[in-house]
Amino acid sequence: MNSADWYKDGRTEIINDLSVFFKRSGKGKSLICIHGFPSSSWDFATIWPSLTERFDVMALDLIGLGKSAKPNRPLPISLQADMIEGLAVKAGITEAHIFAHDLGDTVAQELLARQFEKSSKINWLSCVFMNGGLFPETHHALFIQKLLMSPLGPFIAKLMSEKSLKKSFTKIFSKAHPPTNEFVHETWKLTSGNNGISMMPILIRYIEERRTNRERWVMPLVNGVVPIRLINGIEDPVSGKHAADRFAELVPNADIVLLENSGHYPHVETPKEVLKAFFEFHDKL
């Protein structure tokens, strides 16, 4: 499914004075898909038809990315979590499963922390994480990410291009499944549209937040607040096998599926394997 088809049957809602793009389709228990940085909900397009056969699936563009609002203001993880809760409540969703990737992992950790603290507006039933910085001590940031976090961030962002995005994606995808030209081109259009480049040094602060909030965001994982599975593309230099090993160390009875020939975007690179691991997890619940 190309990005034009993905977005043509979506909707926009105003939550907390910000516009949020989302798609919703399927029947069954609710499932909320949370994408990563710097891409969009379109990341889930390949596996969307299979997910909607079994779930009432909602996928949204996080604030600052895709076709959601791109405001010139701080965009902390708490705001992203507020938007998801607000959108779910407005859609009549009271309980749901989570399927998250990258930046979405961190947003999911905030949502689960709220459940652990008994302040969540939604009853979360389970969470499947894919490659992301669940533990700041094992997250190996790309050089471009470090630059965006520096005082030079706004200047560096202006130098970004489709070519540089492809270079970054090629580093984190597996050798067996490199990013396609379509994925790079469409992601660049969605990222850069509506003054989106200015969002990059604002959004990238989530890496610092991971360090500040480490204990609070790791607590729900260690305490098993909901059933959790990690699906990990082991060729990812940012959060691959080394991150899965840390997950195994810290999470009791850790449920991990390691995917060979898969990198940072397993659902884009090896969608069949991801769906198999995802549905096997849900079949056991």
Image (spheres, helix red, strand yellow):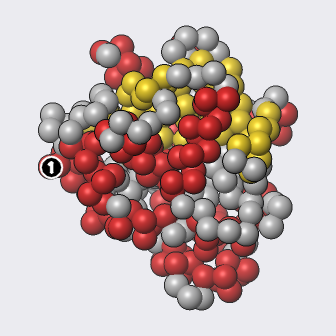
Query: Tag 1, which secondary structure?
Result: helix
Residue plotted at (44% across, 36% down): 120
Tell me if residue 111 comes above or below residue 153 in the rendering: above
In the depicted view, which residue is nearer to us: 206 or 128?
206
Residue plotted at (73% across, 69% down): 72
Q: Residues within 10 Å of mark 1 (few under 14, many from 20)?
A: few
Q: Which residue is mark 1?
A: 249
Q: Is residue 24 left or right of residue 101?
A: right
In the depicted view, which residue is nearer to us: 97 or 237?
97
Residue 193: which quarter of the image? Answer: bottom right
Image x and y of residue 33, in percent: 55, 35
Tell me if residue 157 comes above or below residue 203 in the rendering: below
Image x and y of residue 179, in percent: 60, 53
Residue plotted at (69% across, 47% down): 16
Q: Quadrant of the N terminus?
A: top right
Q: Quadrant of the C terminus?
A: top left
Q: Is residue 241 left or right of residue 178?
A: left
Q: Is residue 50 left or right of residue 7?
A: left
Tell me if residue 210 comes above or below residue 25 in the rendering: below
* Number of numbered markers: 1
Image x and y of residue 131, in percent: 41, 49
- Kindly give the residue lying farthest to the front in the view shown: 119
In the depicted view, which residue is nearer to us: 282 or 73?
73
Q: Is residue 256 left or right of residue 45?
A: left
**What type is the residue that disc 1 sits on?**
Glu
Image x and y of residue 169, in percent: 56, 61
Specify whether residue 161 is in view.
Answer: yes
In the depicted view, which residue is nearer to us: 71 or 164?
71
Residue plotted at (39% across, 24% down): 125
